[in-house]
Structure formats: C-alpha cells, structure tokens
Amino acid sequence: MQNNHYLIVKEKNKKEIAYFEYDKLDGFNMTSKNKNIKLKDAINVNKMVIVNPSMVEKLIDKKINIRMRKLVNLIVNIYDSDDDPGSSMMQALNEIEKFKREMINKYLNYMNKKQLSNLEDKIRMLESEVTKKSYVINENSIEEEVYETRKSR
C-alpha cells in the first residue's frame, strides 16, 4: 500500500490547491489511540500534525485539564485510603512530580508563557496542599503519642 498524505483545509469558496512540505512543518503531533480500527470505505488516519497555534493551545489545555482532573482524583483516593498516611502523602507528592515532568517534557515546546505559568501555579498549589496535609497528619500523630504516654503513667 502506498503512503498517501493528505492536507485538509476548510475554506468555502477557494478553488486553489495548497502544497505543504509536511516533513518540514513544525506542529503538534497526534496519533490515534486505537490503531486496529479499520473501516470500509474510509480513510485510516495514523498520525495528525496540527499546525494552527490557537488549535494547538486549545488541545494542550484540554489534555492538561484532563490529566489534572485525574491527578486530583488520584490524590483524593490516596487520602481516603486506610494505608499509612505518611507513605500515601509521599506517593501523592511523587505523582505530582511525575505529572509536572511529563507535562513539561511533552508540551513545553508548544505552550505559551501564560499556559506555562498557569500550569506551574496549579502544580505549586497541589504540592502545597499535599505538604500541608502531611504536616497536619504528622502533628496529629505526635499529639496522639504524647497523649498516650501521659495516659499510661
């Protein structure tokens, strides 16, 4: 099967053909999640390169917000678990750091300064909340230990 490459341009009344050297275009690469889907009489798309900067910004915002929601849900589940609170806080901090590194490594080239500062603020806020929670848990455990020692005397 030959490699066909397509460019989709939506302009109503233009009757001209535009040629792009797609190998040299610098854009946001997207690949399909399900690579095994094959439909009859349809074009199978393996990879898309998005060049429009505003569309790239919107896609990155959407992807970051989805990952942020998943991270917050994971942290809430870690808080609710009955495991050792100290280890769960460390696990939450590790997940936050992993999220931060992954987002910066994947999307740094495509993000503008505003998006980058918003992401840093959100991550900083999550880290501060987790560390505050760990301090509160540590203080409560120290108070319980002191109370138990006084009670046993």
Image: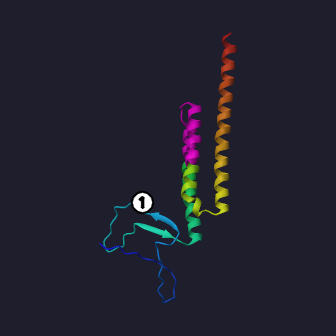
The residue lying at 64 percent from left, 63 percent from top is: 112
Membership of 74 in magenta stretch: yes
Query: Would residue 23 appear left or right of 2 to someone viewing this image?
Result: right
The residue lying at 51 percent from left, 88 percent from top is: 14
Colour scheme in the image? rainbow
The residue lying at 59 percent from left, 41 percent from top is: 93
The C terminus sits in image quarter? top right
In this view, the residue in front, 114 or 146, is 114
Up-down relation of residue 66 to residue 129 (above or below) = below
Up-down relation of residue 134 to residue 126 (above or below) = above
Furthest-top residue in view?
A: 153
Determine which quarter of the picture holds residue 149.
top right
Determine which quarter of the picture holds residue 117.
bottom right
Furthest-front residue in view?
A: 24
The residue lying at 37 percent from left, 75 percent from top is: 4
Secondary structure under the numbered disc 1 in the rendered image: loop
Query: Would residue 21 appear left or right of 118 to someone viewing this image?
Result: left
Q: Check disc 1: other Cα within 10 Å, few if <14, some if 14-19, many if 20+.
A: few
Residue beneath disc 1: 33
Query: Would residue 8 appear left or right of 85 to someone viewing this image?
Result: left
Q: Amino acid at mark 1?
A: Lys
Write the start and end of the magenta stretch as one range.
71-98
Q: Position of residue 38 (x, y in %)?
A: 32, 66
Magenta: main secondary structure = helix
